[in-house]
Amino acid sequence: MEIDAATSGAILKRERVRDAILELIEARRPGDAIPSERTLCSQLGVSRPTLRAAVDELVVAGLLVREHGRGMFVAAEKITQELVSDPNSMSLPQAGGVWTSRLLELRRHPAGARVSRKLRISPAAEILYVARLRLVDGSPIAIEHLHVRTDLAPGLTSDELQQGDLYEHLRDRHDIRVSEAVQSIEPTVVTRAEAELLQVPELSPALLFERLTTDTRGRAVEYVHSLYRGDRYRIVSRLTLSAHDEHPTTEDGHHPGIPPGDFTGGDPVSFSTRGIVQQNT
């Protein structure tokens, strides 16, 4: 496939402008202003559309804030949440800031076709469905939808779902010991109803988390899908790369984000993942 030279040049120019603005951001503190678009165009020698495209990307990424009539400012600092569970707990380490929940819905009903496939139960089997809005320092950050099998924990209460560690409640009060959770993450956009809850424009970028939790007997206990604001949450992975002769060579092994051939075959790659939640200004 041939790459159009003009298109390629425009992309590279915008990337250079983006890098220059990132340097300005890193040299400033949250809330500090950056030069006006006219000044930046002059300093960087680019057109207004090229500069605006780069700035738009940084605004969407949550690194810059535009204020009508005032200018552009460095966005607030971000707080970090480790997405690697404690070896002694199924829970994730709590992120900074004050996390609270607002219950949106709680009801018992048949699992239905989609959720029953996730939980490996009959569509007619009863589940407890919980929808809640997650807030950081009073500002909405995510919408969570929990589906819990009631046949495994028929006495599960709304208080247990809203307060404390759910997995500890399952272990201590219902004799259910969770052992594994498989989680996927993918980009999406918010609907009008979700946008109203999260206080963002409709079709704003978001991250969709889906998690299936199983117990020590291999039974699916809980299915959760959560929607996190894309402007305030991003994923960071830390890779540990090392070469050991005792590991066999694999010709088709590939790690996401690492170009094939960058490391010798068979090198173990371990990683931890963090979520970063941006605080309000």
Image (tube, rainbow, N blue to C red):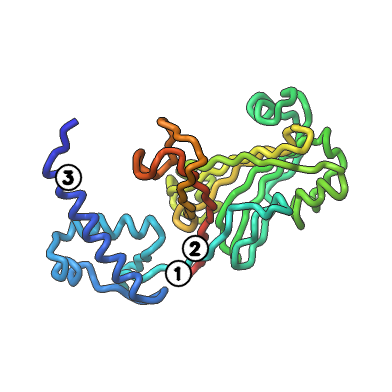
User: Which tag, 3 or 1, sits closer to the chain's start?
Assistant: 3
Tell me the amino acid under the disc marked 1: Ala
**Does the residue at mark 2 contact the one at mark 1 (Cβ under 8 Å)?**
yes
User: Which one is in front in this view, the residue at disc 2 or the one at disc 3?
Assistant: 3
The residue that appears at 24% across and 71% down in the rendered structure is: 36
Determine whether 249 is above or below 67 in the image: above
Tell me the amino acid under the disc marked 2: Gln
Packing grade of label 3 (10 A; few <14, some 14-19, many >=20) is few
Residue 90 position in % (x across, y down): 70, 49
Residue 70 position in % (x across, y down): 32, 73
**Label 1 belongs to which residue?**
76
**Label 2 belongs to which residue?**
278
Under circle 1, the secondary element is: loop
Residue 226 position in % (x across, y down): 59, 45
The residue that appears at 35% across and 76% down in the rendered structure is: 28
**Label 3 belongs to which residue?**
8
In-image side of 190 versus 174 (left or right): left
Q: Is residue 117 visible?
A: yes
